[in-house]
Image (tube, rainbow, N blue to C red):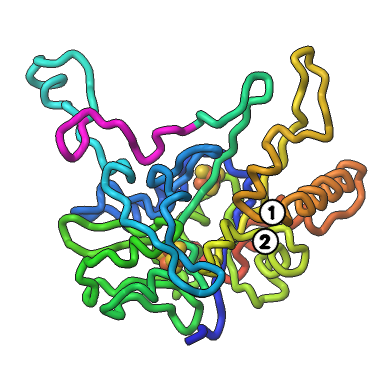
Amino acid sequence: MRPKRQLAMVFDLNKCLGCHTCAIACKTQWTREEGMEGMWWTVVNTLPGQGTPKGWEGMGGGFAPDGRQRPSRIPGREEFGDAWQFNQKEVLFEGTASHLEPRNFKGEKPSWGPNWDEDEGAGEYPNSHFFYFPRLCNHCTHPACLEACPRGAIYKREQDGIVLIDDQQCKGYRFCMEACPYKRIYYNHVQLVSQKCIFCFPRIDQGVAPACARQCPGRMRFVGYLDDERGPIHKLVHQWKVALPLHAEFGTGPNVFYVPPLSPPQVSATGKPDPSKPRIPLEYLEGLFGPRVREVLGVLEAERAKKARGEASELMDTLIVYRWPDDIFPDFRKDPATL
Ligand code: SF4
Ligand code: SF4
């Protein structure tokens, strides 16, 4: 069943600070119960990098071009990084250890964490590069998680297409975790159910933007309906076509779109810039966002140059977000403190 409307987000990667305020806003709002310690429904990875869970892009899932499910597997707790325990008691009260040390859920020294490779990036000096990359459930149009659930516990809301797991129906089989190609579902080892981003639907229902978007100091998370021709989402995705889905080839029709990152030109060992070679390789960005990346970066450069010359650019004005919150989530402007 197709929903009447579809809510979506656009993330302008040129504005993400890597501050993780979004992740903390989500954590403090939704994932504080038992068994949720290691959950980051929205996470900000550094790219190029392995992400969360480790190496998720190579785990399969989603649909092949012929519509068949692509083989996949369930990521393990160690691959997600889980939540670490620290030896505060020994250091602060017993004096039996001199410094804090993390331990994973097995009591061992961890070899991976939710953001283990933060700020590492790729490339060789002077052309090393990275960018921040927020991720969450894409509330897909063709959700692989929903199709995989034998309990019918996953559904798309008719009014806005938000994908939810009914935890009364869920029996923790984790077929959804296996099927989701973005690996954005976590397993609650205490409550024995699968859990994921709920697009802050109780806030949406009252006209309040999701916590990650409202708290974002970079003002890079746009929220709205895809069919709202006056809103920024429709303009960025359909009118100007500068916001692209992540790994569209996974076949699930993601509803989170990304404005790809611009980067300075590569420089030679003597410091001479080569404008034909951006610091972040185009091939890498094409691997994430598909073949239109070059065209989109060209549009962004051209509009940015217009603005620099003092000419009008509606696209740049939209991305800059002069009027907050009106320009970034016009249908969800309400201050939660007023509720
Ligand atoms: S991103 Fe994964 S969990 Fe979210 S709707 Fe798509 S398939 Fe389901
Ligand atoms: S709060 Fe905004 S700027 Fe900060 S990491 Fe999240 S998306 Fe990026």
- Please provide percent x and percent y for residue 293: 72, 52
Count the labels in the image.
2
User: Foreground: 37 or 286?
Assistant: 286
- Please provide percent x and percent y for residue 208: 49, 67
Task: Indicate whether residue 108 is drawn in magenta.
Answer: yes
Could you tell me what secondary structure mostly forms the magenta stretch?
A: loop
The residue indicated by pointer 2 is 327
| Amino acid type at mark 2 | Asp
Earlier in the chain: of badge 2 and badge 1, it is: 1
Task: Please tell me in which quadrant of the rendered image residue 225 appears.
Answer: bottom right
Relative to 50, is 167 above or below? below
Relative to 25, is 337 above or below? below
Task: Please tell me in which quadrant of the rendered image residue 80 appears.
Answer: top left
- Whether tag 2 and tag 1 are in contact, CB under 8 A, the answer is yes
Residue 76 visible somewhere in the drawing:
yes
Question: What residue appears at the point 79 percent right and 53 percent down from the top-left corner?
Answer: 295
Question: What residue appears at the point 83 percent right and 35 percent down from the top-left corner?
Answer: 276
| Amino acid type at mark 1 | Val
> Which mark is on residue 321?
1
> Which mark is on residue 49?
none
**Left or right of 46, for residue 85:** left
> Which span of residues is magenta-colored?
103-118
Does the Cβ of the disc 1 residue fall within 8 Å of ligand 2?
no
Q: 10 Å neighbourhood of mark 2: few (<14), some, or many (≥20)?
A: many
Secondary structure, mark 1, is: loop
Relative to 128, is 21 above or below? below
**Left or right of 133, for residue 82:** left
Q: Distance of mark 2 from mark 1, alpha carbons?
A: 6 Å
